Image (tube, helix red, strand yellow):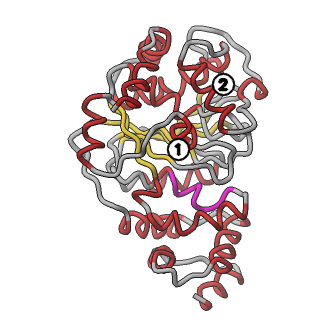
C-alpha cells in the first residue's frame, strides 16, 4: 500500500489491476482508516481515470453479494449525490412513480454520507426493513413492482469505508462509484452525475456494457434533471443536449433552485417525500420528479417523451405511486 500511495501522491494514476486490488485490500482490512482517507482525498483533488474507474468497479462487483434478477426488465434511477445542492429525494420519488405505471424498478441506494438524507434514511424512517434474501427481493419485485437493495448489505466493503466517509463529510470516489455497482445490474439505468467530466467517463465505461442507459448531467451542477438548466444526456444513441424548452413538455414552469431544497434532517425530508407522493407537492417539486420518471420510462419502452410524461403524471396524481409505497411497507 505504501508504494501505491507514493505513486498517487506524485500524480501518477493506477492501472485497472491496482485499482481493483485497493478494493480487495479494503475488504480484507489491509488498509487502515488513515490510508483510506488519503486515497479518497486524492480523488477529491482530481477525477479518476477510466482505467481506475473500471478497476474500482470490478473490485466492488467481484466482492458483492450476488443476486440474480435478470428475469425482470427493470430500471434503476440513481445519482452520484455530493452535488452540495441539498435537494429532496428526487430519484427515489421517481422510482415509485415509475413503479406506479406498472413497470419494474430495482432501486439501489444507501444512507447519506455527504448529503443530509439518502434513500435508505427515508425508507428506514418509514419503517421499511431492508431485505437480504433473494427470494424476498423477488417477491417484492413480483408483487409490488419495486424492490430496494441497501448497498452495505450487498457491498460489505462499503460498511468498512462508512466511518471514513462520514468523518470526511465530503463527497468521495464512492459517490461516483455508487450508481455503477447495483448488484442486480438491471437492464436499464438512469444515472445522474453532477460533474461533466465524470459523466463522460461513465459514458466511455458504459459503451463496453450491455445495459440500456441514460447518463444525465444538469449544466448548473445537479446530478438529476431539475429543470433549472439545460442538460447533457449520454445514451447508446450518443450525446444529446436538451434545452429547457424541450424538457418543459406541458407546462412552462420557471423553476428556481430554492424550490427544490430538502429539509434540515431526515424527518423533514421524509415529510417532503410523503407530501409529494400524496399529491401535496408544489408544482415545481412535481414537475422535477415527473421529468426524471419520464426519462426512466423512455428507457423501458419506445414511447414518446410526451406519452411517458402522461403515464408518470397519472401514476402520481391517481395515487398509484403512493400505493406502491404502501404495498412495499406491508410486505
What is the distance, in whole Å, between disc 2 and disc 1 at their CAs?
A: 25 Å
Q: Nearer the viewer, residue 213 or 71?
A: 71
- Horizontal relation, residue 202 to residue 88: left or right: left
Position of residue 325 relative to residue 1, above or below, is: above
Q: Quadrant of the C terminus?
A: top left
Question: Secondary structure under badge 2?
Answer: loop
Q: Residue at point 39% right, 58% down?
A: 154
Q: Residue furthest left?
A: 71
Residue 128 figure quarter: top left
What x and y, as percent, mark residue 195? 66, 49
Q: Is residue 166 above or below residue 186?
A: below
Q: Residue at x 36, y 68 (%)?
A: 62
Q: Which mark is residue 120?
A: 1
Q: Which residue is most to the bottom?
A: 3
The x, y position of residue 93, in whole percent, is 52, 28
Residue drawn where x is 36% and y is 38% of the image:
147
- Left or right of residue 103: residue 215: right
Is residue 119 visible in the rendered image? The answer is: yes
User: In the image, is residue 49 part of the stretch drawn in magenta?
Assistant: no
Residue drawn at the location 64% of the way across and 84% of the way down = 5
* Disc 1 secondary structure class: helix
Observer-side mark, 2 or 1, equals: 1
Mark 2 vs 1, N-terminal side: 1
Measuring from the top left, give residue 134's x and y in whole percent: 26, 49
Q: Position of residue 255 (x, y in %)?
A: 73, 20
Identify the disc placed on residue 96. none
Q: Is residue 263 above or below residue 308?
A: below
Residue under pointer 2:
227
Callout 2: few (<14), some (14-19), or many (20+) C-alpha neighbours within 10 Å? many
Q: Is residue 95 above or below residue 113?
A: above
- Residues in magenta? 171-178
Amino acid at each position: 500500500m505504501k508504494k501505491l500511495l507514493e505513486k498517487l501522491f506524485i500524480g501518477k494514476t493506477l492501472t485497472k489491476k491496482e485499482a481493483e486490488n485497493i478494493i480487495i485490500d479494503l475488504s480484507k482490512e489491509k488498509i487502515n482508516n488513515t490510508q483510506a482517507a488519503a486515497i479518497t482525498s486524492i480523488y477529491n483533488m482530481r477525477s479518476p481515470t477510466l482505467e481506475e474507474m473500471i478497476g474500482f468497479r470490478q473490485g466492488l462487483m467481484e466482492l458483492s453479494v450476488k443476486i440474480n434478477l435478470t428475469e425482470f426488465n427493470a430500471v434503476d434511477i440513481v445519482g452520484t449525490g455530493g452535488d452540495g445542492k441539498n435537494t429532496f429525494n428526487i430519484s427515489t420519488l421517481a422510482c415509485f412513480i415509475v413503479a406506479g405505471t406498472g413497470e419494474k424498478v430495482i432501486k439501489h441506494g444507501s444512507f447519506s454520507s455527504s448529503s443530509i438524507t439518502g434513500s435508505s434514511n427515508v425508507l428506514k424512517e418509514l419503517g421499511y426493513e431492508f431485505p437480504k434474501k433473494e427470494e424476498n427481493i423477488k417477491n417484492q419485485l413480483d408483487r409490488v413492482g419495486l424492490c430496494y437493495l441497501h448497498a452495505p448489505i450487498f457491498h460489505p466493503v462499503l460498511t468498512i469505508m462508512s466511518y471514513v466517509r462520514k468523518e470526511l463529510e465530503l463527497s468521495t470516489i464512492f459517490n461516483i462509484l455508487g450508481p455503477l455497482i447495483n448488484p442486480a445490474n438491471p437492464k436499464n439505468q438512469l444515472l445522474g452525475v453532477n460533474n461533466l467530466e465524470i459523466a463522460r467517463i461513465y459514458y466511455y465505461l458504459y459503451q463496453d456494457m450491455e445495459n440500456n442507459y441514460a447518463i444525465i448531467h444538469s449544466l448548473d451542477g445537479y446530478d438529476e434533471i431539475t429543470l433549472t438548466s439545460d442538460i447533457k444526456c449520454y445514451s447508446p444513441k450518443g450525446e444529446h443536449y436538451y434545452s429547457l424548452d424541450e424538457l418543459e413538455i406541458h407546462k412552462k414552469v420557471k423553476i428556481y433552485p430554492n424550490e427544490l431544497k430538502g429539509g434540515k434532517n431526515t424527518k423533514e425530508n421524509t415529510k417532503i417525500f410523503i407530501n409529494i407522493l400524496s399529491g401535496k407537492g408544489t408544482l415545481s417539486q412535481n414537475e422535477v420528479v415527473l421529468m426524471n420518471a419520464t426519462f426512466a420510462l423512455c428507457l423501458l419502452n419506445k414511447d414518446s417523451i410526451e406519452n411517458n410524461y402522461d403515464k408518470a403524471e397519472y401514476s402520481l396524481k391517481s395515487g398509484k405511486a403512493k400505493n406502491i409505497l404502501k404495498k412495499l411497507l406491508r410486505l
